[in-house]
Amino acid sequence: MVKEDTKKGPWTEQEDVQLVFYVKLFGDRRWDFIANVSGLKRTGKSCRLRWVNYLNPGLKRGKMTPNEEKLVLELHKKWGNRWSRIARKLPGRTDNEIKNYWRTHLRKEAQEKKKKGMSSYSSSSSSNSSSSSSGSKSPTVEPTPVTENTECSFHDTGGLDFLVDMSKKKIGLEIEDGSNTMDEIFSYLDFKEGNCNLPYQTMASPIWDYFPNDSLWAMDEEGNKMFMQPMGDLFHSFPFCNNMIA
DNA sequence: AATACACTCAACCGCGTTGAG
DNA sequence: GCTCAACGCGGTTGAGTGTAT
């Protein structure tokens, strides 16, 4: 199906909020479905990309740590440009982020070291050369444990500033500084790490209380197939959504 | 202060894979 | 087994930003 007037280019704040809302509602799998029901004039592909690379609350932002850098080098040496595979070993980092990082930082570095005849990669920028695995050619490099409690977690590094600002301005959340802001936002959306992948059927989310029982689903003309009604306007029927984008 | 150049990263594109019908 | 739509991945692009001259 060819989508007419599909939007491209940078995402707006409202689109982001809307996408977060619908992913929260339906999980992060059915991207074409989400693209359709959300009313966003985006392809499912575009929605997925935006979520995976930017909106996902599990993302970690900020500079790569020396350990992460080292791990990327090790894994790239082992797997080549299998970015998504490498990304799975670095919690909170996306394939796109690692790919970009590699291209801008590490590729040059690795090439230079190769020229100099170094037999294995190791991060020169890593001051942590005394790490227990230093010099090891072991293929199983333990990733630095990256948790939401580390100092440079996504929440703490000011990701999604727009949501923060918007929350301050439009939701009325009282946020004093940068800490906890995203927690507050996602908490507000009842959207915490760890349950964002839940299929909507199993989400014990009060968000469903908002839905009228018979407004989401309808039968097709033959009456033999249920389908989800377009919900572009439904987003606006939630009080807090209107508050957010008003 | 203005300009050029370098860098970063969000987003798009094309293609291969997967799974439902 | 075949077809087609959706998904996921890797490569690439280009706008925005930073830095050097």
Image (spheres, coloured by chain):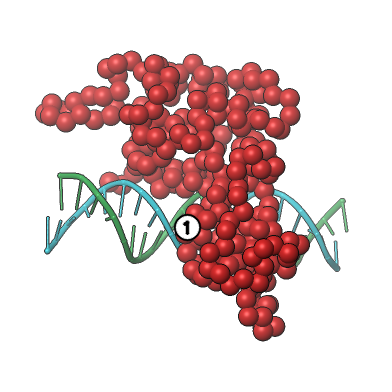
Chain colours: A red, B green, C cyan
Residue A28, compared with residue A115, is above or below; it is above
What residue is drawn where x is 54% and y is 38%?
A57
Please indicate whether residue A197 sits to the left or right of residue A149 in the image: left
Q: How many marks?
A: 1
For mark 1, name the chain. A
- Image location (x, y in percent) of residue A183: 60, 30
Q: Is residue A187 visible?
A: yes
Viewer-proximal residue, A21 or A46?
A21
Q: Specify the amino acid type for callout 1.
A: Ser
Q: Residue A30 occupies which quadrant of the picture?
A: top left
Residue A3, compared with residue A211, is above or below; it is below
What residue is drawn where x is 44% and y is 43%?
A47
Quick one: label 1, few (<14), some, or many (20+) residues within 10 Å? some
Please indicate whether residue A65 sits to the left or right of residue A38 in the image: right
What residue is drawn where x is 24% and y is 30%?
A227
- Image location (x, y in percent) of residue A15: 50, 35
Please indicate whether residue A169 sits to the left or right of residue A51 in the image: right
Residue B5, compared with residue A66, is above or below; it is below
